[in-house]
Image (cartoon, rainbow, N blue to C red):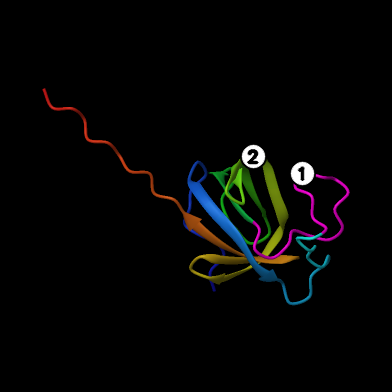
């Protein structure tokens, strides 16, 4: 059984909430009621929530998924993202937390060739 994903801190990653976990502590909110960044949202993130940012901690069972967010649902939105603790590694690119199942993808940044003299 896997206990972590092989993405080191500092990696650029994208995550997408693909579903609620089987027995979530908090049911997902709805897009009709969800206000990004509001402390008054009811429920956890809506299914389909996406973000891109820099991974702050290793992805391991027992730890929260922590990302310095640069984009949220396609728009620039700096901030900190922290999930509930990870309870399982569902697949090579998926983790389950107390509330959600997320697909986690490492974003490869192309390296520019050095200019030849």
Return the residue at label 1.
37
- Mark 2: secondary structure: strand
- Residue 98, by quadrant, is bottom right
The span shown in magenta is: 33-49
Q: Quick check: 45 left or right of 58?
A: right
Write the residue at 67% across / 71% down: 19
Q: How many marks?
A: 2
Q: Where in the figure is residue 1, as x and y percent of width and height?
A: 54, 74
Write the residue at 87% across / 58% down: 42
Query: Marks 2 and 1, how far apart in space?
Result: 9 Å
Q: Quick check: 87 left or right of 27?
A: left
Spot the residue most to the front.
Answer: 32
Establish if 106 lies above or below 1. above
Q: Quick check: 116 left or right of 110?
A: left
Write the residue at 78% across / 75% down: 23
Q: Which mark is residue 77?
A: 2
Categorize mark 1 by other alpha carbons within 10 Å: few (<14), some (14-19), many (20+): few
Quadrant placement of the C terminus: top left
Write the residue at 60% across / 60% down: 16
Q: Nearer the viewer, residue 46 or 10?
A: 46
Asked if marks 2 and 1 touch (Cβ < 8 Å), the reply is: yes
């Amino acid at each position: 059984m896997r206990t972590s994903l092989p993405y080191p801190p500092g990696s650029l990653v994208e995550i997408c909430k693909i579903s609620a976990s089987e027995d979530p502590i908090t049911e997902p909110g709805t897009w009709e009621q969800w206000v990004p960044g509001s402390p008054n949202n009811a429920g956890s993130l809506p299914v389909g929530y996406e973000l891109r940012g820099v991974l702050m901690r290793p992805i391991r069972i027992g730890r929260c998924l922590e990302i310095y967010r640069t984009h949220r649902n396609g728009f620039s939105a700096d901030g900190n993202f922290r999930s509930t603790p990870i309870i399982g590694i569902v697949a090579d690119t998926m983790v389950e937390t107390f509330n959600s199942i997320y697909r986690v993808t490492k974003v490869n940044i192309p390296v520019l060739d050095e200019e030849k003299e």
